[in-house]
Amino acid sequence: MWYFLIKQALLDMAQHRDLQRRAAITEIEIFNEPYGNWYIYGVERQSYPEFMDHLDSAGITYELIAERPSREEMLMRMR
Protein backbone atom coordinates (compact mmCIF):
# COMPACT_ATOMS: atom_id res chain seq x y z
CA MET A 1 0.00 0.00 0.00
CA TRP A 2 1.19 3.51 -0.84
CA TYR A 3 -0.06 6.59 0.98
CA PHE A 4 -0.64 9.97 -0.64
CA LEU A 5 -0.77 12.86 1.83
CA ILE A 6 -2.56 15.95 0.57
CA LYS A 7 -3.37 19.12 2.48
CA GLN A 8 -7.12 19.48 2.80
CA ALA A 9 -6.98 23.15 1.80
CA LEU A 10 -5.58 22.21 -1.64
CA LEU A 11 -8.67 20.26 -2.74
CA ASP A 12 -12.24 21.22 -3.40
CA MET A 13 -14.99 18.75 -2.50
CA ALA A 14 -15.36 17.41 -6.07
CA GLN A 15 -11.63 16.61 -6.25
CA HIS A 16 -11.77 14.91 -2.86
CA ARG A 17 -14.74 12.73 -3.90
CA ASP A 18 -12.97 11.76 -7.10
CA LEU A 19 -9.84 10.75 -5.20
CA GLN A 20 -11.94 8.83 -2.67
CA ARG A 21 -13.35 6.72 -5.51
CA ARG A 22 -9.86 6.03 -6.85
CA ALA A 23 -8.26 5.13 -3.49
CA ALA A 24 -8.64 1.93 -1.49
CA ILE A 25 -8.64 3.84 1.83
CA THR A 26 -9.35 7.47 2.65
CA GLU A 27 -8.64 9.06 6.03
CA ILE A 28 -8.59 12.61 7.37
CA GLU A 29 -6.14 13.76 10.03
CA ILE A 30 -7.54 16.81 11.78
CA PHE A 31 -5.19 19.23 13.50
CA ASN A 32 -5.82 22.40 15.47
CA GLU A 33 -4.52 25.81 14.42
CA PRO A 34 -1.96 26.73 13.24
CA TYR A 35 -1.67 23.36 11.46
CA GLY A 36 -3.90 22.35 8.58
CA ASN A 37 -5.82 19.13 8.10
CA TRP A 38 -4.58 16.37 5.79
CA TYR A 39 -6.26 13.83 3.55
CA ILE A 40 -4.55 10.45 3.47
CA TYR A 41 -5.35 8.26 0.47
CA GLY A 42 -4.21 4.65 0.62
CA VAL A 43 -3.65 3.14 -2.82
CA GLU A 44 -2.77 -0.45 -3.69
CA ARG A 45 0.70 -0.95 -5.10
CA GLN A 46 -0.54 -1.88 -8.59
CA SER A 47 -2.81 1.21 -8.77
CA TYR A 48 -0.44 3.86 -7.47
CA PRO A 49 1.14 4.90 -10.83
CA GLU A 50 -2.30 5.70 -12.25
CA PHE A 51 -3.29 7.59 -9.08
CA MET A 52 -0.03 9.54 -9.15
CA ASP A 53 -0.48 10.39 -12.85
CA HIS A 54 -3.97 11.68 -12.10
CA LEU A 55 -2.68 13.94 -9.30
CA ASP A 56 0.17 15.21 -11.47
CA SER A 57 -2.12 15.98 -14.43
CA ALA A 58 -4.51 17.85 -12.09
CA GLY A 59 -1.62 19.84 -10.58
CA ILE A 60 -2.31 18.55 -7.05
CA THR A 61 0.66 18.66 -4.67
CA TYR A 62 1.17 15.53 -2.55
CA GLU A 63 3.62 13.56 -0.46
CA LEU A 64 4.03 9.89 -1.32
CA ILE A 65 5.15 7.43 1.35
CA ALA A 66 5.20 3.65 1.68
CA GLU A 67 4.03 3.45 5.31
CA ARG A 68 1.11 5.23 6.93
CA PRO A 69 2.57 7.93 9.19
CA SER A 70 1.33 8.26 12.74
CA ARG A 71 -0.38 11.45 13.84
CA GLU A 72 2.73 12.36 15.83
CA GLU A 73 4.98 11.89 12.77
CA MET A 74 2.72 14.13 10.72
CA LEU A 75 2.77 16.80 13.41
CA MET A 76 6.59 16.67 13.59
CA ARG A 77 6.78 17.24 9.81
CA MET A 78 4.67 20.38 10.09
CA ARG A 79 6.76 21.94 12.84
Image: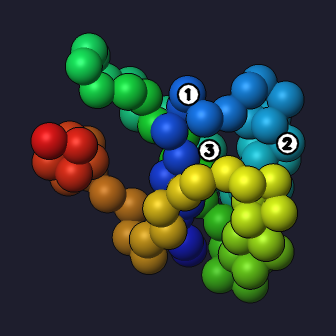
Q: CA distance from mark 2 to mark 3?
A: 11 Å
Q: Is residue 57 visible?
A: yes
Q: What residue lies at 44% left-to-right and 76% top-to-bottom?
A: 66
User: Helix, strand or loop at disc 2?
Assistant: helix
- The location of residue 65, given as percent across then percent down, is 43, 71
Q: Is residue 54 left or right of residue 26?
A: right
Q: Which mark is residue 9?
A: 1
Q: Which mark is residue 53?
A: none
Quadrant location of residue 30? top left
- The location of residue 25, given as percent across then percent down, is 63, 51
Q: CA distance from mark 3 to mark 1?
A: 16 Å
User: Helix, strand or loop at disc 3?
Assistant: strand
Q: What residue lies at 26% left-to-right and 47% top-to-bottom?
A: 74
User: N-terminal of the two: label 1 or label 2?
Assistant: 1
Location of the N terminus by quadrant is bottom right
Residue contact between numbered discs 2 and 3, judged by CB atoms under 8 Å = no
Residue at image mark 2: 18
Farthest residue toward the bottom?
A: 46
Q: Vertical placement of 16 versus 22: above or below?
A: above
User: N-terminal of the two: label 3 or label 1?
Assistant: 1
Q: Which mark is residue 26?
A: 3
